[in-house]
């Protein structure tokens, strides 16, 4: 079934925060936690995975933090969803719960079709679009330099 986990919401909030507030300046995870209310225990695990997968770049040191590893327009929500899903353990397969003929023949294929459409839609939305929407909605950027070197 289509479900958006807390971990996915936190990951998206963090990546959008970095894209919106960071520019060429690393964004410390404590700043993201403060602005977005994302629990630190979720954030670090997800951030490390996003670094490993090439979405973010980690910068060490006193002025360290995270930067986008790619341009905002080249990062899709679907990409982040895929990475977060790989972190989450599937303790039970919801599709195996209902073995009725209607579920097997009609409902499960319907859910699968909807999930594919949902995933396609997620892949069509970029971090750039979300950042533009935040700007249009009057969300103030942090005081960091926000230079974006998009080509």
Image (tube, rainbow, N blue to C red):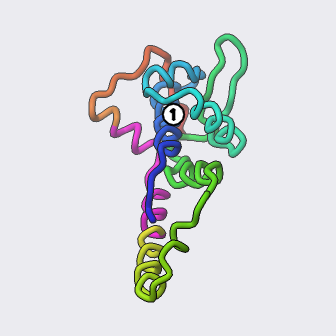
Residue 125, magenta (yes or no): yes
Tell me if residue 69 comes above or below residue 123 in the rendering.
Answer: above
Residue 146, magenta (yes or no): no
Q: Residue at x 65, y 36 (%)?
A: 45
Quarter of the rendering occupied by the C terminus: top right
Residue 89 spot, x, y in % from top left: 63, 53
Which is nearer the eye, 19 or 31?
A: 31
Horizontal arrangement in the rendering, residue 3 relative to residue 58 (left or right): left
Within 10 Å of disc 1 (Cα), the crowding (few <14, some 14-19, many 20+) is many
Residue 23 spot, x, y in % from top left: 53, 27
Which is nearer the eye, 136 or 84?
A: 84
Residue 72 spot, x, y in % from top left: 52, 41
Tell me if residue 101 comes above or below residue 96 in the rendering.
Answer: below
Q: Residue at x 68, y 28 (%)?
A: 58
Q: Residue at x 48, y 76 (%)?
A: 98
Residue 77 spot, x, y in % from top left: 49, 50
Horizontal arrangement in the rendering, residue 59 relative to residue 114 (left or right): right
Picture quarter containing residue 90? bottom right
Q: Residue at x 51, y 67 (%)?
A: 94
Quarter of the rendering occupied by the N terminus: bottom left
Tell me if residue 148 comes above or below residue 79 in the rendering.
Answer: above
The secondary structure making up most of the magenta span is helix
Horizontal arrangement in the rendering, residue 113 relative to residue 29 (left or right): left
Give the extent of the magenta segment: 116-133
- SS state under label 1: helix
- The residue under label 1 is 14
Which is nearer the eye, 87 or 53?
A: 87
């Amino acid at each position: 079934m289509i479900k958006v986990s807390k971990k996915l919401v936190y990951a998206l909030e963090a990546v959008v925060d970095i894209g919106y507030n960071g520019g060429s300046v690393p964004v410390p995870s404590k700043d993201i936690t403060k602005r977005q209310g994302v629990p630190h225990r979720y954030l670090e695990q997800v951030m490390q995975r996003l670094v490993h997968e090439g979405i973010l770049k980690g910068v060490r040191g006193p002025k360290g933090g995270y930067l986008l590893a790619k341009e905002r327009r080249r990062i899709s929500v679907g990409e982040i969803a895929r990475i977060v899903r790989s972190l989450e353990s599937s303790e039970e397969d919801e599709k195996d719960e209902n073995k009725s003929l209607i579920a097997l023949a009609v409902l499960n294929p319907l859910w699968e079709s909807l999930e594919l459409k949902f995933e396609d839609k997620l892949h069509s939305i970029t971090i750039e679009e979300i950042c533009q929407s935040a700007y249009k909605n009057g969300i103030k950027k942090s005081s960091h330099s926000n230079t974006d070197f998009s080509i």
